[in-house]
Amino acid sequence: MTARTEPPRESLRARLQKIFRTTAFKLSLAYLVLFALLASVGLGYVAWNARRVLDDQIVSTIEAEINGLSEQYTAGGLRRLIAVVERRAKEPGASLYLVTTPAGEHIVGNVSRVPVGVLSSPGQYEGPYGRGAESDHAEHRAIMRVYTLAGGFRLLVGRDTEERDRLRDAIGNTFGSSLALVLVLGVVGGWFVASRVLKRVDDMTETTRTIMAGDLDGRLKVSGSGDELDRLAQNLNLMLERIGELMRGMREVSDNIAHDLKTPLTRLRNRADEALRTARTPDDLRAAIEGIVEDGDGLIRVFNALLTIARLEAGSTPEQAGTTFDAGEVAGEMAELYEALAEERGLHLRFTAEPNLPLRGNRELVGQALANLIDNAIKYGEGGAPEITVAARREGDHVTLRVADHGPGVPEAERARVLDRFVRLDAARTRPGFGLGLSLVAAVARMHGGHLSLGDNATGLIVTLTLPAAEV
């Protein structure tokens, strides 16, 4: 017994490349970039709005101080203004004051210099300035307003923007570090999510390889989380179950074909052989050939039924769309067609139908399905009450076509199996047939969007063909 060869382990680089190429990682990265952009826009708006609010507060404070100092000047003249400004200039804080002569000479204040032209142009200004107690190399920025007093004296009131700039820098630094942290966590999270998804996909791939190798019993793992991969795995498992059933059905069909067609083929061959050996007159040869033709017609009917079932199950019937017809009329025609045969077998065929039973589909196929059901009822209805019932009625949004007999019936455990091709119960093997009638009816039902069901009829069987009613 040869040992199973384990697949070679992937290198870390190859593993990372596979993860980076996964859709999960790419989506995580795309969401990360989108989140970073939205966060940048949001934080930028917050920073801009905060600066605007601070600037408005500074301007309001400057305006209030200018109004107050103007009132001091009006009430007490230059001497009082100088005293008030000198006192305020010595107080710690970000407030700036300067009083100059009409010629621009400094009188009092804590501002040593401003750019040329500022004092000669009344109004608001934001820019650099120098404090009186600092060296010429120290420079700050401030929002200032120049106001011309009566007599030509100039009053400058401002506020240093260091706190505002510090807040801006703090927001910027916080944003930079937060963005870096988000990027790192996003990449790590994307790698984690992608690796988990890739592991599950690799497990699915390995399972599909075993299935392709011939192990149809293999199934995809379901984690139980109920996510999209679980739903995919469940649907694929259902598909595999269906494929397994079809494969088993094909094997059963092959076995049944070999079993059920062997007898008529052997009989056909024996008749031909007997005709060659024993026929002495043209009449003998003619009788032998007629028997061979009859057996050949039976085999042709079997294969025609098989082809019809295959076409119906494949959905390739060109008349599938069909037209609208009355199911009661079709059922009545089939009942009338088989009435004489039933009487020959000592059976009474009773037919009932409600009016206006519209169906949309293939009238011939529905009629053939009903013919198969009535033929089966006549074939197996002997031995019980001598009555066969054919009924057509409306039940909600569906039309039901029922055929009931009082024969031996079908055991409940076998009712699903008898709908398969070439399946015949032991009690039915003594009667003519190949086990294709119910298979054809079930295929017709599926083609029309309906279903076929078997039930008890006291001492017999009741078969119900349920089809969607057409809208009129």
Image (cartoon, helix red, strand yellow):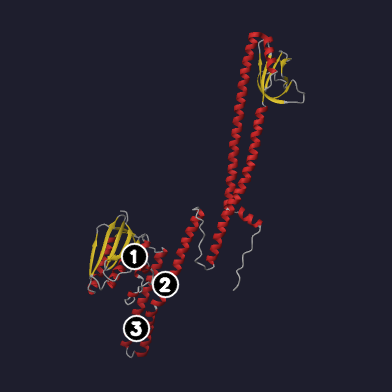
In the rendered image, which quarter is residue 314 located in? bottom left
Say whether disc 2 or disc 3 marks the residue closer to the N-terminus.
2
Residue at the spot x=75%, y=26% of the render? 138
Three-letter residue code for mark 2: Val
Three-letter residue code for mark 1: Leu
Say which residue label 1 marks: 365
- Tag in front: 2 or 3: 2
Say whether disc 3 or disc 1 marks the residue closer to the N-terminus.
3
Res 120 visible: no
Say which residue label 3 marks: 289
Q: CA distance from mark 2 to mark 1?
A: 23 Å
Helix, strand or loop at label 1? It is: helix
Helix, strand or loop at label 3? It is: helix
Image spot of residue 386 (x, y percent): 22, 71
Say which residue label 2 marks: 253
Image spot of residue 196 (x, y percent): 57, 54
Image spot of residue 453 (x, y percent): 33, 63
In the rendered image, which quarter is residue 159 located in? top right
